[in-house]
Image (spheres, helix red, strand yellow):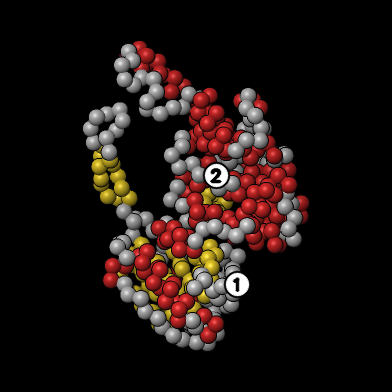
Amino acid sequence: MRNLQNAIVRLLKARPFYGHFLLGFRRLERSGPAPLGVTLQGGTPTLRVCPERFAAHSGIEQSALLEHIIKHILHLHPVRREGRHPLVWDLACDLAVNPSIEGLPAAAALPEPLALEAGLAAEDYYGQLCRSFDIGNLDGPGIGDAGQDDGRQAGRGREESEAALKKEARHRERFDDHREWEQADSTPVRLAEEVVRQMVREAWQRSDGEVPGDVRPLVEGLLAPSPVPWMQVLRQFVATAGRVGRQGTWMRQHRRFAHDTPGIRKRRRLNLLVGIDVSDSTDVRELREAFARDLLRIARGRDSQITVLYAGSRIQRVESFKGRSAVSEVYEGGGFTDLRPVFDHARGMNPPPAAVIYLTDGYGEAPERMEFPTLWVLTGDGRMPADWGVELRLDV
């Protein structure tokens, strides 16, 4: 993906904040109709690139495309569409970010051709587009005492609206594939916000506070102290860690059909690897007890398998238990810290863990890249040991 690497280098030189922010993305190669697609997968911003299609764009367009997907993540667009019509939301998000980007391909959606005002938020565009495309709910035309002709006409209207939206989506997919956003549906907004907040903080520091003017208010808001309690972030990270299997259920009555409707409920199995740093700097019994107590409180009552590794420079002790039978214990160790053995152990597990949670002060060598969704639970004076993973501060 040399063309992508060159484009990132150009972005680092021209707009350092965007370039450093993009370095925090997981980058994967894939084929598809669009050169780029971005999502929040397991709480981690993930950029999927089709090298051939990306290389077909000029250098100016490549920079604009990268700025486009960066702004989608800064605004948390992939995780904010819950309960909304996906095609309408996708278009609304593009209308919100595109006007401020120079050099986009001709296929880029803009407000003016749709007779909409520029500079609105995605939610504002969504409401206006729903009215424009006549996308309503089930209480609209065709329900109740209306005649069959009215119902058929309303049905045709909805079909025409859907066709128009799909045509617009195919047009936009020439440069940005929003189908990737489906992978973000299981990521809680609060968790995604904490991930983006951390990435913004790091990009801001590395770019010496140089932030493009159009996103400065947004960035300043993300740089402010997080209002989210650490327990809530931990709970949401655990909730997204694993999802396997399906379980039949019955939904409430459909508003159009007066009978119960069979449905599907996804059954979640929690499969976690927990690393506990036993070096002298984290040898605080109250800290470890608080972490263990809160983690087990979340895990109890779930179909879960938790493996706990106590490690300093090497793994000193391994425990494994089910969530329902978990008990809070503390193992005391000592010595210096090497963070890599825990991840070496994770690679050898079968099945592999859905996520890694590591309690540490961060002073130790970590792997160069992330292979598993990772939550770094850091002590109050700890430091982030890697440029990947989610950061969480634990104060007791």
Q: Nearer the viewer, residue 57 or 44?
A: 44
Q: Is residue 237 above or below residue 314?
A: above
User: Which numbered disc covers residue 77?
Assistant: 2
Q: In the rendered image, which residue does mark 1 sit on?
A: 383
- Helix, strand or loop status at disc 1: loop
Image x and y of residue 317, in percent: 40, 82
Instruction: Tell me what residue is drawn at x 44 percent, y 72 percent.
Output: 291
Q: Residue at 58% across / 55% down in the picture?
A: 196
- The image quadrant that residue 176 belongs to is top right
Asked which secondary structure carries label 2, the reply is helix
Q: Which residue lies at the image location 52% right of the left edge and 52% below the top edge?
A: 40
The quadrant of the image that shows the N terminus is: bottom right
x and y, in percent, of residue 328 in the image: 35, 76
Disc 2 marks a residue whose amino acid type is His
Q: Is residue 237 visible?
A: no
Residue for point 66% across, 27% down: 112
Q: Name, please, the residue furthest toward the right.
A: 14
Q: In the rendered structure, are the residues bearing label 1 and label 2 in contact, judged by CB atoms less than 8 Å apart?
A: no
Q: Nearer the viewer, residue 148 or 5?
A: 148
Image spot of residue 216 (x, y percent):
70, 49
Type of the residue with mark 1: Arg
